[in-house]
Amino acid sequence: MDAVVDLLINKVAQTVEENASLILGIKDQVEDLLEELKSFKAFLIEASKKNESCNANAVLRDVVQKIQKVVADAEDAIDKYLVERRNHRARPVLKRWAEKVSYYTKVNEAAKEIETIKKRAEKIRLDHAPSLKKLQENNPQLAVLQKAPVVEEDEVIGFDEEAKTIKDRLTEKLNDTVIISIVGMAGLGKTTLTNMVFNDRELHYGSFTRLWLHVSRNMNRRRIFMDIISEFTKELSAYNEMRDEQLAQRIKEFLKDGMYFIVLDDVWKTTDWDHLKIAFPNNQKGSRILVTTRNLEVANHVDSKNAPHKLKFLEPGESWELLQKKVFHKETCPEHLAPTGRSIAKKCNGLPLAVVVIAGVLDKNDTAARWKEVAEDPFPLINRESQSYNELVSLSYNQLPSHTKDCFLYLAAFPMGHEIPVWKLICLWIAEGFIPSSKNMEGTAETYLKDFVNRNLLMVMKKRADGEIKSCRLHDTLHEFCKSEAMKNNLFHEIDGAKIEGNKDYRRLCIRSNLRSFIHSESKPSGEHIRSLLTSTKYEVPKEHLATIPKSYPFLKVFDVEELKFEILPKEFYQLYHIRYLAITTDLKLFPKPFTNLWNTQTLVFNTSQSSVEVKAEICKLTKLRHLLANASFEFPTPENCRDKCEDLQTLSSISPKSCTEAIFDKMPNLLKLGVRGNLEELLEKKGGICLFDNIGNQLHKLQNLKLVHETANGQGSILRNFPRADKLPSNLRKLTLSNTSFEWNDICILGSLDGLEVLKLEEFAVKGDSWELNNTVFKSLQFLRIGRTDLAYWTCKETSFPALKKLYLLHCTNLNAVPLALKDVKGLKFMELFCTNKNAATSARNIKDFKSEGHGQLELSVYPPDHSG
C-alpha cells in the first residue's frame, strides 16, 4: 500500500523539481502539501507493518484510494498552474503588464486550491488513525503460515527428459556434496519435477537420509532446523533453548556419517540459502542437495560452479496431452472437441499450472459451445478459478521491492502476447514517473527489468549483440494478473470498446479497439484527469478529427499513438505542454517549429513516409530531451542565438551527414548513440580543410554506439574513398554498424585501434573486395562480429586477431571459401552462424566445431540451408 503512496508523492516532488522556476507563485503551498503527504506515507508504513489480515488490508486500501484522489487533484491543480504560468511568461511584456491583475488572481486561486487539498489529506489521516490503531492492537505481528507445495500433480507430462538430466547430475560418481539448482517461473512445475526425482526408486538406495524441506517466502530457519532434528530424535525438548547456530552444529553431526539427499523447495533469497547451508556438511559421502527457486540470482548463488537447470515450458503437444488427462482421465477426448481443446492448450503457453487450472474449469460433458467460449479467452478464468495460481503470482509480486511494483504491473499496458521492445518500455517507465530522477534513469530502469527476469516474472525474447535484453514478453497468465491488479490500484485501465463506466478517476488509458467509436463516445473519461493514452490499433485519423484527442486530453504526459496516422498536426497538438513521451506517425516532410513548445518532452518518436525530414523546431530548447528517434534522417539547421543545450540527449537516430557540424554537436555533448544516414561522402570527404566526421570523434566524447548508413538520392550506394582516420574515431566506441558503405577490407583493420570495440556489424555491402588479411591487426575487445552480403572469398587471420570473440555471424557470404581455421583456438568462441553461404564455408565451420568438441570447448553451430553442412 505504501508503494502506491510513495509513487504519488515522488511524482508531485519530481514535478516541483523539474519546474522550479515556474512553481514560484505556489511554492510554499506545494511544499506544505508534500510534507503532509510524507507524514501520511510514514503513517501508512507503520500501520501496514503489523497487519496482514483481510480486514486491515481493506481499511488500508480504502485509505490509499482516498489519498490517490487527493494527489490526483493536486497533480491536476499544479499542471494547470504550470501551463498558465508558462503562457504568461511567453507573452510580450506589455501584454503581461495589462493582464497582471487577472494573472495574480489565478495564482492566488491556485494557492488556495493546493491549501484545500492539503487539508483534505490531513483530514483523511486523522479520520483513519483510530481505526488503524485499533487494528494494530488487535492484530500483533501475525505468524507466517508455512504452506505445503501447491503444484503436486498426479499426471506428470513433459518432464521425463528434464528428470533424466537432473538424475544424471545427482548420480555422478563424485564424493563431494553436489548442489543442484532448478529455476523457473511460478506454476512451471519446479516442485513437480523435483518430486519426480525425489521419489525415483533408484535414488532411494544408498541414501542414509532423505529430507524434503519447504522453505517459502518467509523462511523460518529455526523451524526448518527443528524439523530436520525431529527426523533423528523425538526428544526435542533438549533443543528448545539452543541458538540456531548450535542447532546447525547438531544437524551436521547427525548427517556426517552417511550419504544424504535433501530438497530445499522454494528458496526465495540468497541470504536464506546462506543461513541454511551451515547445517549441511561436505562429508565426502556423495551427498546431494537439490534447490528449487523462481529467482535466477538465487539459483546462481546456490551453485556457483555449474549453470542452474532452467525449467522449460511445455510443448503444445505436451500441453494438450496434460489437458486431456486432466479433463478425461483415462477416456479419450471426443473428436468434435479436440480442435478446440488443442487451441485452449496452446493458449496456456506451456505453463503446466495454467493447463491444470483451465482443465478444472472444463468438463468432459460440456458442450462444444462451452469449450469454444473458454477458448476465446481462458486467462480471466484461470485467475478467477484458481486460488492456488493467484497465490503463486501474488507471492512473487508481493516480494518485489515497493518501488518496482508499478513498473511490473505496467507491463500489461502492452497487449497480451506482445513482444515488448525494451528501449520503449524503459522510456515509458521514465515518462510515467516510475523511475527516480537522476542522470542515469535508463540504468536504474534496466536493473528493475533484470530483476523481473531473474525472478522469472518476465520472459526474454531477444538479446542484443552485447548480450543486453532487446525485447521481452509477459506470460499471458501473468498479464491477466497484472491487468487486474493495475485496475485495482487505478494504475491504468484497458478500454476494449466504446462503452466506459465509472471513469471519472482514470489516469491512464490503453485503447485496444474501436478507436473511432471511442473518440466519438460521449462516455469518454474526463479529459483533465487523463495523463497517458496508449493505443495499439491502426487508424488513419480524418482531418476533421485531428484535434479531438489533444483537445479532450490537454494534460497528457504519455501519448503513444504510433499506429495512428496524422496527415497534419493541428495547433492543439502543440499545446500538450506536459508531454514527456510522444510517438506519432505522419507524412510530414518537416519537423514543425511549434514542437519547440513541448518543453517537457523526454522521448520523441517521429515516424514518417519521407526519407529525410527538415527540422524547423529549435531542438536545443527541448532541454529535457533524452531520446530522439525517427525512421528518416533529420536535417538540422545551424543553431542561432540559442544558449540552451540538450545535455540529457542520449539517442539521436538518425541525422543527415551534412548536419554533423560542430555547432550542432555542441548542443548534444552527451550523446551515447548516434545514427548517420544519407550520402556519407558529405560526412567523410574534406571540404575546405574540414571533414565533418571529425566532429563526431572530437566532440562526442561519451559516444558508445555509432551506425553509418550510406544512401544517395537515387537510392543506390557508391564506393566511398575515404575511411575515418584512426585518431578521429570516437575513443569510447563499443558498437559500430556500417551499411552499404563499400569500404575496403584494409580499412576495417583500422578499427583494431579501438580498444573498447565489442560489437562490429558489417551489414550488406558494407565492405567490398575478395580478400581480408588481418596480419598483425588485433581486435582486443571484439565479442560479436557480423558480416553481411559481400564478395569476400579469402579471409585469413591469427588466433590472436580476435582474442575476445564470442559470436560470429556470416550472412550471404556466397564466395567465402573457408572460415579461418585459426578461430578454433579462440577459447571464448561459443556460437557461429552461417546463413546462405556455401558448402566449403560450411565444411570449414564444421571442422572448427569438431576441433572444439575434442576437449577444446563447445561451439554451437547453425548452418542454413542445412545441406550445406556437408
Image: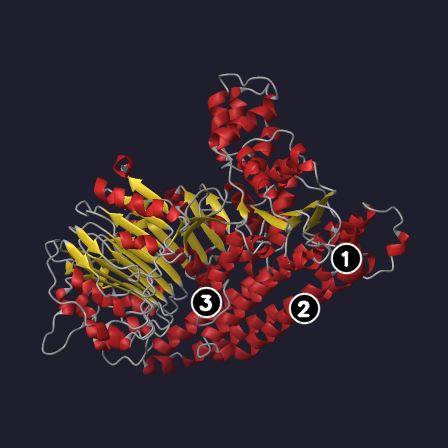
- Nearest to the eye among marks 2 and 1: give it: 1
- Residue that numbered label 2 is attached to: 42
Q: Quadrant of residue 102?
A: bottom left
Nearest to the observer: residue 845 or residue 489: 845
* CB-based contact (under 8 Å), mark 3 and mark 2: no
* CB-based contact (under 8 Å), mark 1 and mark 3: no
Q: Look at the image and tell me whether residue 803 can be seen.
A: yes
- Residue that numbered label 1 is attached to: 248
Distance from Cα at disc 1 to Cα at disc 3: 44 Å
Check disc 3 and report its element: helix, strand or loop.
helix
Image height of 312 relative to 824, above or below: above
Distance from Cα at disc 2 to Cα at disc 1: 38 Å
Q: Look at the image and tell me whether residue 556 can be seen.
A: no
Counting residues from the start of the chain, the first of labels 3 and 2 encountered is 2
- Residue that numbered label 3 is attached to: 441
Distance from Cα at disc 3 to Cα at disc 2: 26 Å
> Residue 95, which numbered label?
none
Check disc 2 and report its element: helix, strand or loop.
helix
Check disc 1 and report its element: helix, strand or loop.
helix
Counting residues from the start of the chain, the first of labels 2 and 1 encountered is 2
Query: For mark 2, does the 10 Å Cα neighbourhood hold few (<14), some (14 to 19), or many (20 or more) residues?
Result: few
Circle 1: residue type: Ala
Residue 160 point in image, percent of width and height? 55, 33
Q: Residue at x 60, y 63 (%)?
A: 5
Query: For mark 3, does the 10 Å Cα neighbourhood hold few (<14), some (14 to 19), or many (20 or more) residues?
Result: some
Q: Is residue 441 left or right of residue 771?
A: right
Residue 302 point in image, percent of width and height? 60, 54
Q: Is residue 620 left or right of residue 484?
A: left
Image height of 701 relative to 612, above or below: below
Circle 2: residue type: Ala
